[in-house]
Image (cartoon, rainbow, N blue to C red):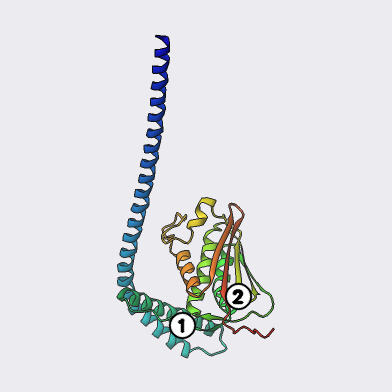
Amino acid sequence: MFDDMRVSLKQKIGELDHANHELSRKNRDIEEALERLRRTQEDLVRSERLALTGTLTAQLSHEINNPVHNIQSLLSSSLRKIRAGDPAHELVSVALEEANRLAGLTRQMLDMYRGAPAAVERSPLDVMEIVGEVVRMYREPFAGQGITIDVSTGSALPMVRGSRDKLKQVFLNLLLNARDAMPRGGSVSIAARGEGANVTVQVDDSGTGIAPEHLDRVFDAFFTTKKEVSGVGLGLSVTHGIVHQHGGTITVASIVGKGTRFTITLPSGEPRDDTH
């Protein structure tokens, strides 16, 4: 009798173990299904945001065109009235160049919305010359916020082929990103070097850094850790797209409380000498 009870108890325990395994398996299946559903919902929200952003961008671009054209006209007129040696001449020239760039960007956004192929300018460019233009615009306002900018380069760098406006946008975005990471001041260093057939530019800041769990998402559209309204999470996504459009790569490394480094590598536009 006791033997029968022991056998029956073992059977019950075995059945219970089997039921527990089945329950665990079903729980895992449910968790995986919920995770797939969460990712699907995120993709849907992202798609809806992108669609809405495209419509709003087209509308805003159309509305912005008129005042931009007026600004271009006024700046051109002002520039003709200022002597070439006057310090104001350079400032107005820079302002006109930026207004022209803004007009070009609005045209590109409208063309993209209409489905027209975007023509990409390809010309030989000095990357550090572009960096210098951006730094000159922001060195003084950054200094007012307690932020210093240091630029260094090694020997003469090879030229790259691409769009001056787009690459300018890359370094502009990285500088503004660094500024936002240093609300109490700090330093930004930009260093460039030639590496074989490539040009590598490193942009370092001494800011708050990026948490490890966020590093893989910094280039995602609409992802941002900024609390301000201005942080919409598109700057680094646009930067990533431009760099890849130029056949290059961009990576990020960061230590919380220490700072962040973005490394951009662009292919040289100069033909390689294969005779050596």
Compared to 80, does 2 lie above or below? above
Q: Which amino acid is tagged 1? A: Glu
Query: Residue 257 location in percent, x, y?
Result: 60, 52
Helix, strand or loop under label 2: strand
Q: Which mark is residue 121?
A: 1
- Characterize the local packing of mark 1: few (<14), some (14-19) or many (20 or more) Cα atoms within 10 angstroms: few
Query: Residue 114 location in percent, x, y?
Result: 30, 76
Residue lying farthest to the top in this orientation: 1
Q: Which amino acid is tagged 2? A: Asn
Query: Residue 142 location in percent, x, y?
Result: 56, 66
Query: Residue 59 location in percent, x, y?
Result: 30, 71
Q: Nearer the viewer, residue 69 or 158?
A: 158
Compared to 257, does 68 lie above or below? below
Q: Nearer the viewer, residue 90 or 229?
A: 229
Q: Which residue is denoted by mark 2 in the rendering?
A: 198
Compared to 27, does 33 lie above or below? below
Q: Splitting the image into 4 quarters, where does residue 251 fall?
A: bottom right
Task: Report, in whole angstroms, how far the alpha carbon at label 1 lies from the one at label 2.
Answer: 19 Å
